[in-house]
Amino acid sequence: MVHQLISYVNHWLNEVNSHSLQAPFIYNFFTKYIQRDFNKGLFESIEQTRRKLLDEDYLVATVNYGAISIVHPDSQQTKVSTIAKNGLTPAKVSRLLARLIEFNDAKNIIELGTSFGLNTLYLAQKENSSVVTFEGSEDIANVALTNFEHHQKNNIELVLGNIDKTLPTFLDARIRIDFAYIDANHKYKPTIEYFESIIKRMHKGSILVLDDIYWSKEMTQAWNEIKAHPEVTHSIDLFSVGIVFFQPDLVKTNYRLMF
Ligand SMILES: C[S@@+](CC[C@H](N)C(=O)[O-])C[C@H]1O[C@@H](n2cnc3c(N)ncnc32)[C@H](O)[C@@H]1O
């Protein structure tokens, strides 16, 4: 909590808005895809599912692959409503993800950390896209699968199991990834390992988003390392998430922007 608070104040003091952005690429990206919430209101049916989950009091078995659970550190059984309230990204971030895949016209999308599949559904709304999402808890995955069925989405594949094992197998067979969203194991080492292996399948137009970059010192350490990676050209810190680009014609720059 102290780390999050200090990081938040630091971000607030240093973040900039469009007036400070000179370079055309970042100015356009920021004003058209981050500031403009142009897809607000388009996902009402997914938000209805979120509201339903907030009312579900049955228990699901969570998994703990090293990081302390965001929701219930001591419990293996957690109410669906508790996870829906505390363990999911807000709709504002989900809409941002949906705008980002419009920006780079992503077709091959991966998501680490399905949970109940709300962000997955946002990502799967895009035409001609396919989303592969990874989840370790069978109970949680079953809730997500029910949601995918309810929304009649057949462009989603859910990979069940520990991402440490399932991701390398998946990547061995996958040639190209246009967009990756990482919101799973909140530890430094696995986060860096996931990043390193995913970018081998990315190209200069790909985008990678890391969630919860100030959730813990370990996550901030991972974010700092990702920003400094030689293949990352632009990084954008929105406090809640970090976005990275790999376009070789961009001059390496790190931005902290208002969101
Ligand atoms: C923060 S939640 C994801 C929330 C989701 N992005 C959303 O907002 O809709 C993280 C999920 O990742 C899963 N997870 C964490 N570490 C994992 C691992 N090593 N392998 C598989 N799943 C994992 C957890 O079970 C949890 O459901």
Image (spheres, helix red, strand yellow):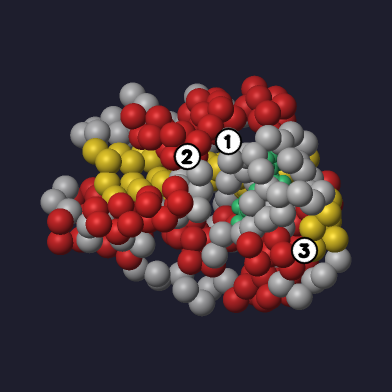
Mark 3 and mark 1: Cα distance apart in space: 23 Å
The crowd level at tag 2 (other Cα within 10 Å; few <14, some 14-19, many 20+) is some
Residue beneath label 1, please?
187
Vertical position of residue 168 compared to residue 224: above or below: above
Left or right of 176, for residue 241:
left
Left or right of 69, for residue 259:
left
**Quarter location, residue 253:** top left
Residue 232 vs residue 56, the one in the foreground? 56
- The answer to whether mark 2 and mark 1 are in CB contact below 8 A is no
Give the residue type at disc 1. Lys
Mark 3 and mark 2: Cα distance apart in space: 28 Å
Give the residue type at disc 3. Val
Q: Determine whether the beta carbon of the residue marked 3 sits less than 8 angstroms from the nearest atom of ligand 1.
A: no
Front of the two marks 3 and 1:
1
Q: Is residue 18 visible?
A: yes
**Quarter location, residue 175:** top right
| Label 2 or label 1, whichever comes before in sequence order | 1
Count of labels in the image: 3
Q: Position of residue 182 (x, y in %)?
A: 55, 42
* Residue 30: image tag: none
Q: Is residue 110 visible?
A: no
Residue at screen point 47% across, 39% down: 217
The crowd level at tag 1 (other Cα within 10 Å; few <14, some 14-19, many 20+) is some
Residue beneath label 2, please?
217
Residue at screen point 30% across, 52% down: 10
Q: Position of residue 229 (x, y in %)?
A: 37, 27
Vertical position of residue 155 compared to residue 148: above or below: above
Residue beneath label 3, please?
80
